[in-house]
Image (cartoon, rainbow, N blue to C red):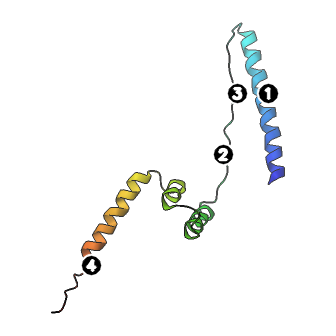
Amino acid sequence: MMDLDLKTDAFETNCIEFCTNIINLYLEIANKQTDFTVNFVRNQLVNDDELITEIIDSVNAGLMSRETAMQRHPLIDDVKLEKELLDEEDMQKFEQQPMIEEEE
């Protein structure tokens, strides 16, 4: 993976240089001056199944809290809402359990 990262870094540097040159050429032709910065955002391909498994394993091993796991889970967008939904489900399960009567 290291080799791919190095190639990506070099490609990104070349792209930034190219874009900067194109923008500078345009500004020169248009007789304009402005400050600008060219930025690239890298997105990595992630296998959600593997990520979820790693999160579960980390929680089970005591390496990660459930809160952090929920924040990093790729299918959970709103941790607060998800916790509220889980609490509601737990309450419904509790209410559906039969009451155990004590014998006298």
Q: Are there few (<14), some (14-19), or many (20+) residues within 10 Å of tag 1?
A: few
Q: What residue appears at the point 73 percent right and 20 percent down from the top-left corner?
A: 23
Query: In this figure, which residue is indicated by the disc labeled 2?
Result: 43
Which sits in the foreground, 83 or 6? 83
Looking at the rendered image, the disc whose residue lies closer to the viewer, 3 or 4, is 4
Task: Pinpoint residue 69: horizontal percent, then vertical percent.
Answer: 53, 59
Residue identified by numbered label 4: 97
In whole angstroms, how far apart are the C-alphas of marks 3 and 2?
A: 17 Å
Which badge, 2 or 4, is on the more N-terminal residue? 2
Give residue 61's position: percent from left, percent from top. Answer: 59, 70
Residues packed near mark 2 inside 10 Å, few (<14), some (14 to 19) or many (20 plus): few
Residue at left 70%, top 27%? 38
Q: Residue at x 52, y 61 (%)?
A: 65
What type is the residue that disc 4 sits on? Gln
Which residue is denoted by mark 3 in the rendering? 38
- The residue lying at 54 percent from left, 55 percent from top is 72
**Residue that lies at the very extreme toward the left in this rendered image:** 104
The quadrant holding residue 101 is bottom left
Residue occupying the far top of the picture = 31
Position of 49 with respect to 86 (left or right) is right
Residue nearest the observer in this picture, 91 or 103: 103
Q: Where's residue 26, x and y in %? A: 73, 15
CB contact under 8 Å: marks 3 and 4: no
Disc 3 residue type? Val
Pointer 1 or 3: first along the chain = 1
Label 4 environment density (alpha carbons within 10 Å; few <14, some 14–19, many ≥20): few
Q: Which residue is mark 1?
A: 18
